[in-house]
Image (cartoon, rainbow, N blue to C red):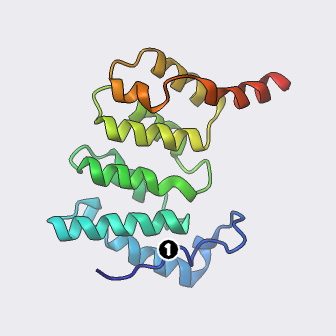
Amino acid sequence: MPSIPGETIAAPSGEPMDCAKVPVVADTLKRIERLLGPACHPFGREATDLALLALRALGNAGAVSGDDILRTCYEDPANSPELRVGAISALRRIPCGHQRDSNVLRLFSNTSEDVEVRIAAYLAVMQCPTLSALRAVKEGLYTEQVNQGKSAKPDFEHFKPFHERINHW
């Protein structure tokens, strides 16, 4: 399997930067994104493995060439849950605000979605929580019918820092 640079694209200082605008980085990102296949539909196990590797590289890089590339992968129910979770996980280093809140929250809120996809969506939303996202997640966890969804975060202890910060203002 080919080696795909990912970590080397992220800012060495760990500080967020829009490196996707640097020509050599933009070219590298586009090459990695091409491994996802047409419309993020890899055909066969080898192509799927390569697409998953590409998603990991994009996640490591913390950048994509366009806002829709990951969403195309994670929103399409025709894609395997493994590929959709990989696309959601690729959001981990992408700066907050890149379509994460509403699009990923919609996946978490959809009770007919695959449980693994919903848990990955929950984790992605909680990386960049907004007040409206916290309210939606709290409501979703109260009404959750699937045990895996409940066990992902069985209580609301992780909301306390946000609650304290909000009440402080």
State left or right for residue 135 relative to residue 150.
right
Characterize the local packing of mark 1: few (<14), some (14-19) or many (20 or more) Cα atoms within 10 angstroms. many
Residue at 36 percent of width and 49 percent of height: 85
Residue at 28 percent of width and 46 percent of height: 76
Q: Can you say which quadrant of the picture contains the N terminus? A: bottom left
Q: Residue 129: horizontal and vertical position, in percent? A: 62, 37
On the image, which quarter does residue 39 sit in? bottom left
Disc count in the image? 1
Q: Is residue 111 visible?
A: yes
Decide which of 154, 76 is in the foreground and name it: 154
Q: Is residue 37 visible?
A: no
Query: Does 110 appear above or below 126?
Result: above
**Helix, strand or loop status at disc 1:** loop
Decide which of 14, 34 is in the foreground and name it: 14
Q: Can you say which quadrant of the picture contains the C terminus? A: top right
Q: Residue 31: horizontal and vertical position, in percent? A: 39, 78
Decide which of 133, 69 is in the foreground and name it: 133
On the image, which quarter does residue 35 sit in? bottom left
State left or right for residue 135 relative to residue 91.
right
Query: Does 56 appear above or below 21?
Result: above
State left or right for residue 107 relative to residue 102.
left
Q: Residue 137: horizontal and vertical position, in percent? A: 52, 26
Residue reaching furthest left? 44
Q: Residue 65: horizontal and vertical position, in percent? A: 49, 68
Residue reaching furthest top? 143
Residue at 24 percent of width and 51 percent of height: 79
Give the amino acid at mark 1.
Answer: Gly
Residue highlighted by disc 1? 6
